[in-house]
Amino acid sequence: MKERYDDLDEYIADLKAEIAQNDQCATHYYNLGLALLTKRDFVAAEEAFLEAVRNSPHLAEAYVQLGGICLERGDLDGCLRYNEEAANCRAKFPVPLSNIAFVHLQRGEPDKAIAALRKALKWDPKFVQAQNALATALYMKGEYAACEQACRDAVKLEPGFAPAWNNLALALFELERFEEAEEAVSKARELGFDVPEGFMEELRLRARREA
């Protein structure tokens, strides 16, 4: 939202007035969609983003937002389709590649996820969410040492990124390095991650056996 607006509804009303004067401005539709998303009006936001891409078919960000709306309603096919469109519209755009990987992870397709994530990280090596998703994909494949490395790369980028500490704990557990796994779990919890109690109990049990 523009800083000069203190009221979201006022901003939306002004955007609609500008669209009434020029109904072919993709930027106005895109900004309207973002404002409507803030209000969680997904139906109206979707229509605004669709109008944006009708007027500017290569507006990659709008396709990403449409994919997010699909995900909100559990439509993985739609999410994948829109993010693939976004990736096709703009080369070297890591966000849709990461979203594509997310869909593949949800479908249990780690190899496809890894391919998309490696492209995303090629264009943005500091994309910590993509780095952590790569760790998740490697864990799904049973490549625990590679998962550990991906997690360590993630926390090196952003030490406060709790999901990466949790993934690190999972990888270290599978590698039977239980004391290190406990340290990673503690860090994840300290940063606010909700670690399943069952995993913590199993980890404590295995750590005591190794002591």
Image (cartoon, rainbow, N blue to C red):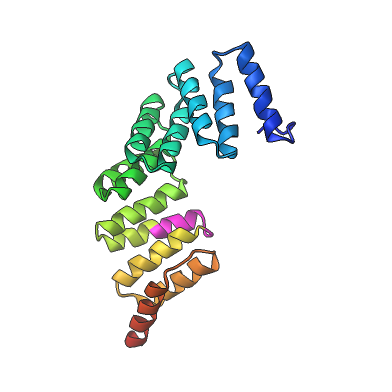
Depth check, front residue: 24 or 121: 24
Q: Where is residue 124 in the image (x, y as percent from the top left)?
A: 44, 41
The quarter in which the C terminus is drawn is bottom left
Query: What residue lies at 24% left-to-right and 56% top-to-bottom?
Result: 141
Which stretch did the figure color magenta?
151-160
Q: In this view, does 113 lie to the left or right of 36?
A: left
Badge count: 0
Magenta span contains residue 25: no
Q: Is residue 136 left or right of residue 141?
A: right
The quarter in which the N terminus is drawn is top right
Query: What residue lies at 48% left-to-right and 16% top-to-bottom?
Result: 55
Q: Where is residue 109 in the image (x, y as percent from the top left)?
A: 25, 48
Q: Is residue 162 left or right of residue 79?
A: right
Give the quarter of the image for residue 198: bottom left
Query: What residue lies at 49% left-to-right and 20% top-to-bottom?
Result: 51
Q: Position of residue 156 (x, y in %)?
A: 48, 57
Magenta span contains residue 159: yes
Query: What residue lies at 36% left-to-right and 39% top-to-bottom?
Result: 75
Residue 209 to residue 72: above or below? below
Residue 152 to residue 33: above or below? below
